[in-house]
Image: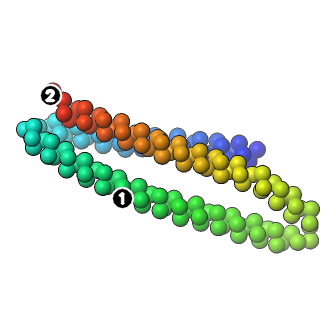
């Protein structure tokens, strides 16, 4: 039961993350193309502007990615520290009940590997969706900004 709830939660979290990254990248790409087409400059200057913009976007994304990974890492570590403290205090409080402690340990022994497997799948899915949305937005900008229309 708990594993299916974790799967549903991770699926929901992955979908929200994919939608947010798609909206941010696609919206930024459309606005950028609109700005470039509005302020159409000669070909050489446009290439210089695009190269500088590409460097700016890559630098900003790298910084944002590093900050995001640091935040996620600290949140996950904090959550697991709280979980570990809660479990250890629960086990300490149940010293008089040996059977309860053994059943909790066996249940956690089955649940924790499934949780980490689902968490790893979520992380891979979010990173893959983020990368694909970034590539699609960049392709859109390059295609529309460099078109003759």
The mark nearer the N terminus, 2 or 1, is 1
Q: Is mark 1 on a helix, strand or loop?
A: helix
The reply, left or right, for residue 133 in relation to residue 121 is: left
Q: Is residue 141 visible?
A: yes
Q: Vertical placement of 64 versus 54: above or below?
A: below
Q: Where is residue 142 in the image (x, y as percent from the top left)?
A: 25, 36
Between residues 106 and 28, which one lies in front from this camera angle? 106
Residue annotated with mark 2: 148
Dot 1 crowding, Cα within 10 Å, few <14, some 14–19, many 20+ = few
**Residue 68's quadrant in the figure?**
bottom left
- The residue positioned 40% from the left and 39% from the top of the image is 133
Q: Where is residue 46 in the image (x, y as percent from the top left)?
A: 13, 41
- The residue positioned 19% from the left and 33% from the top of the image is 146
Q: Quadrant of the N terminus?
A: top right
Colouring: rainbow
Q: Which residue lies furthest to the top in this view?
A: 149
Q: Position of residue 23 (x, y in %)?
A: 39, 40
Dot 2 crowding, Cα within 10 Å, few <14, some 14–19, many 20+ = few
Q: Position of residue 98 (x, y in %)?
A: 92, 66
The reply, left or right, for residue 127 in relation to residue 112 is: left
Between residues 138 and 23, which one lies in front from this camera angle? 138
The reply, left or right, for residue 37 in relation to residue 133 is: left
Residue annotated with mark 1: 63
**Residue 148's quadrant in the figure?**
top left
């Amino acid at each position: 039961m708990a594993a299916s709830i974790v799967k549903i939660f991770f699926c929901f979290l992955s979908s929200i993350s994919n939608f947010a990254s798609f909206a941010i990248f696609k919206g930024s790409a459309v606005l950028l193309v609109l700005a470039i087409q509005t302020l159409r400059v000669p070909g050489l200057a446009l290439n210089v502007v695009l190269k500088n913009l590409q460097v700016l976007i890559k630098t900003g994304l790298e910084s944002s990615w590093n900050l995001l990974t640091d935040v996620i890492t600290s949140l996950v570590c904090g959550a697991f520290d709280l979980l570990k403290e809660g479990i250890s205090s629960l086990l300490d409080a149940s010293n008089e009940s040996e059977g309860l402690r053994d059943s909790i340990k066996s249940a956690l022994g089955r649940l924790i590997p499934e949780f980490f497997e689902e968490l790893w799948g979520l992380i891979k899915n979010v990173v893959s969706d983020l990368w694909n949305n970034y590539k699609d937005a960049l392709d859109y900008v390059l295609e529309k900004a460099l078109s003759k229309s």
